[in-house]
Amino acid sequence: MGTNVVIGSFERFFRHRRVNITKYIEMDATFELLKSSLLVAFSGALRVHIAFLLLQVQSSLFTYIAGGLVIYAVYTLDRTLESKEDAENRKELNGSRKEIGLAVSLLSFLIGSYILAKEGMLIIAFIPFVTGYLYSKGIKIGKFAVRLKGRAGVKNLVVGLTWGASIAGLAGKSCGNIVPVILLFVFFGVKLFVNSTIYDFKDIKGDTLAGIETLPVSLGEKNTRNLLTGMHLCSHLIIGIALIYGLFAFEPLIILTSFMLGLICIQNHTKYVDEERPLQKLSRIVLVDGESTLILGLRMIPGSLLG
């Protein structure tokens, strides 16, 4: 009788422990899910600010906030609507409460949309959100199916076109000349195409297992690196010429810093490693997601010194 009581106590103890551990893992994964897009959103809001600076038009803090909220909503939605490759590429999100991620994503989108609607730019909120859903899950009506994921370069093209158009649209609404707005679209479109492809190198293993043909998988490391370098050089050459001819505000430090950081990132982070070291991960995050912060931070230094 005493033995049964002791055994029963141990069983209850371990059952309680397993439940607590499961809840802890679930909470931790959910927290990771909610914070995983914060830096991307902040960086995106700063990119909108850079666009305003280059176009030299009146900026709005609310536009930056709305842009950041929409970006956060789109990327959190993508991480919430998990796919096969995410089990390998984003292991830290396994076990997270997807309904919480979905609720936060929708709330963020609604707030961002409301702000943009008041500024007459509601469509700019819906374009990336709808495109993000088509990319993550797609739609299927009978035999007709659309999903913007799977073919080499399609994802990167979608990312570049969507966010390039969104940034140029937000900043260019009050610009009287369409030419610099188009050039801005090309500049940020290429930049985000390159950045998304750099992240594909990190995800080669998961994408290969899921049968997704990303550019590094299809073209190989060297060819993809050369493609990104060429695109990066051309986009900055175009924007540099536009700067010289006065189509943009004279902000050479922004263009030069963007050029150097992008070049360093392409050369250092387009090589597949099975397990990314902490310093490599930090470098990639700083150079890709933190690029706009670095650009604006370095831009402030000359003014501070002169002041």
Image: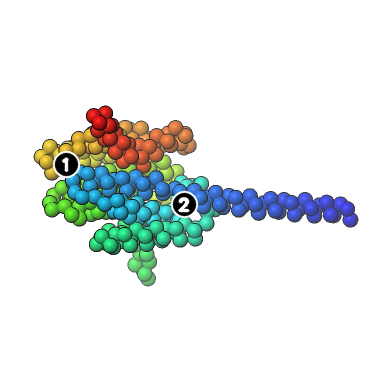
Q: Say which residue appears at 38% left-offset and 37% top-offset.
A: 286
Q: Secondary structure at mark 2?
A: helix
> Which is more toward the observer, 285 or 134?
285
Q: Secondary structure at mark 1?
A: loop
- For the C terminus, the image quarter is top left
View extreme (front): residue: 307
Residue marked by disc 2: 34
Q: Say which residue appears at 33% left-offset and 62% top-offset.
A: 114
Q: Is residue 265 above or below residue 139?
A: above
Q: Is residue 186 visible?
A: no
Q: Quadrant of residue 235?
A: top left
The circle on residue 107 is: none
Q: Say which residue appears at 35% left-offset and 37% top-offset.
A: 287
Task: Tell me residue 81's x, y (percent).
Answer: 44, 57
The circle on residue 249 is: 1
Q: Is residue 82 visible?
A: yes
Mark in front: 1 vs 2: 1
